[in-house]
Image: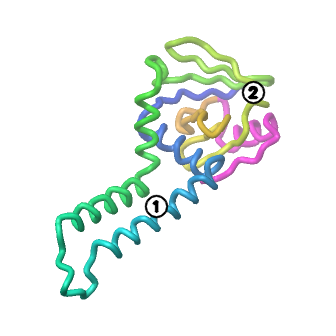
Amino acid sequence: MNFSFVTQYNREAVATMAKALRKTVRRKKSRRSHIIGVAVILLALLLALPFGNENNPFEFKDAITLAVAAILGLTLIFEDRINGDIAMKRMLPGLKSSKAVFGEDSYTSETEVGTSEFRYDNIVMLAENSDYFVFIFSANHAQVYDKNSLSGGTARQFREFITKKTGREILQF
């Protein structure tokens, strides 16, 4: 049985890929960054807001401190979209669409640039959400496959196939 996907590497797909990386191989680093970010936001609030101290009026520097805290908070909230946008800007021309065909020993990915063959044993982790399968190769490299474009079987059948071929469990995120 040959499974195939046609995936458009659009904003949603690349943000999903960034989220999968953050929730799997980058988990510890991401957690530390979030703890530090929240601590900096709380510190900024403590420094900028007068909290009933009438002798300390609200000044321009306090407004700047609160603005920086707000920007940091928004960055933490939207980090997957931001990382996805950065990844899209770094993506080579011709890699916006991919057709992948999965065979017994390997799978091929065809783009405008060319065709690449990948072995299943290079996959470090597998992840899945409601719309995509994500193959993780390292902390900075992953591939995403759109479930809506799957042909050759069902998502459940592909899940069983890929876990058997890689020997890895699929993490839900």
Query: Residue 99 location in percent, x, y?
Result: 56, 22
Asked if residue 50 is positioned above or below residue 29 in the image, the reply reads: below
In the rendered structure, which amino acid carries the disc numbered 2? Met
The residue sitting at 45% across, 42% down in the picture is: 83
Depth check: give the residue in front, 53 or 170: 53
Considering only vertical position in the picture, is 59 above or below 24?
Answer: below
Residue carrying label 1:
37
**Kind of residue at badge 1:** Gly
Q: Which residues are magenta?
A: 152-173
Report how many numbered discs are placed on residues in the image. 2
**What residue does disc 2 label?**
1
Mark 2 surroundings within 10 Å by alpha-carbon count, few (fewer than 14), some (14 through 19), many (20 or more): few
Foreground residue among 4 and 143: 143
Q: Secondary structure at mark 1?
A: helix
Q: Residue at x 19, y 87 (%)?
A: 54
Can you name the residue that lies furthest to the top here? 114
Residue 138's place in the image compared with 81, above or below, is above
**Residue at left 54%, top 27%?**
6
Q: Quadrant of residue 124?
A: top right
